[in-house]
């Protein structure tokens, strides 16, 4: 991973401020310098649809009021300006996992994480979807 990779614009979407803060803290510990947050799915949808907002990766909660994380995924993957960008879905253990995974996969989700998760799990998912190798690691967290 290069210094340029650390400038990857990452959008973190979660209506739970504590979860959002933890994810952002993890990303900062990995060395990412361009993290954007959306406190609501409505705010995130506007960012996803905006041609002015550069986004290389979305980390989105599934369980939010309309639009849901699945709605955000559909909008993101169908938007021609987002081609090549990645989307990681985050959900809780309480959810109906098999159904959700199948739904998210049908709309092109790049990875899936179940809460609660640790920094190393998030880091591994990001490195995998971005095609970076473990040797490309400039971060402090592991």
Image: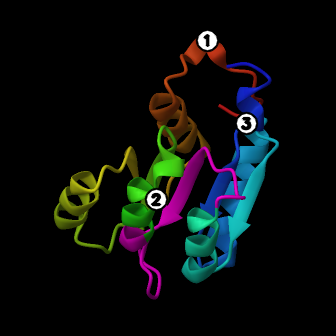
Pick the front one: 118 or 51: 51
* Residue 56 appears in the figure: yes
Image spot of residue 90 (x, y percent): 45, 60
Image spot of residue 81 (x, y percent): 54, 49
Residue 76, disc:
2
Quadrant of the snapshot with the C terminus: top right
Q: What SS does tag 1 mark?
A: helix
Picture layout, residue 5 above or below residue 44:
above
Q: Is residue 73 left or right of residue 10?
A: left
Cβ atoms under marks 3 and 2 closer than 8 Å: no
Q: CA distance from mark 2 to mark 1?
A: 30 Å
Q: CA distance from mark 1 to mark 3?
A: 14 Å
Pick the front one: 16 or 10: 10
Picture layout, residue 63 above or below residue 31:
below
What segment carries the magenta color? 51-71
- Which numbered disc flags the more N-terminal residue, 3 or 2? 3
Q: What SS does tag 2 mark?
A: helix
Cβ atoms under marks 2 and 1 closer than 8 Å: no
Q: CA distance from mark 3 to mark 2?
A: 24 Å
Q: Which residue shows up at 61% across the image and 78% down it? A: 16
Q: Residue furthest bottom?
A: 65
- Which numbered disc flags the more N-terminal residue, 2 or 1? 2
Residue 51, disc:
none
Residue 135, disc:
1
Total numbered badges shown on the rendered structure: 3
Picture layout, residue 76 above or below residue 13:
above
Residue 30, disc:
3
Q: Which residue shows up at 75% across the image and 22% down it? A: 138
């Amino acid at each position: 991973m290069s210094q340029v990779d650390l400038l990857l614009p990452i959008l973190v979407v979660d209506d739970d401020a504590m979860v959002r803060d933890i994810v952002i803290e993890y990303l900062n510990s990995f060395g990412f310098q361009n993290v954007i947050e959306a406190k609501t799915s409505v705010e995130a949808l506007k960012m996803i649809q905006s041609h002015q907002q550069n986004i290389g990766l979305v980390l989105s909660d599934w369980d939010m009021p309309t639009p849901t994380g699945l709605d955000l995924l559909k909008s993101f993957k169908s938007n021609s300006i987002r081609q090549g960008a990645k989307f990681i879905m985050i959900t809780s253990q309480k959810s109906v996992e098999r159904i959700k995974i199948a739904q998210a996969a049908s709309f092109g989700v790049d990875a899936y994480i179940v809460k609660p998760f640790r920094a190393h799990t998030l880091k591994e998912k990001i490195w995998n979807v971005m095609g970076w190798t473990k040797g490309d690691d400039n971060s402090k967290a592991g």
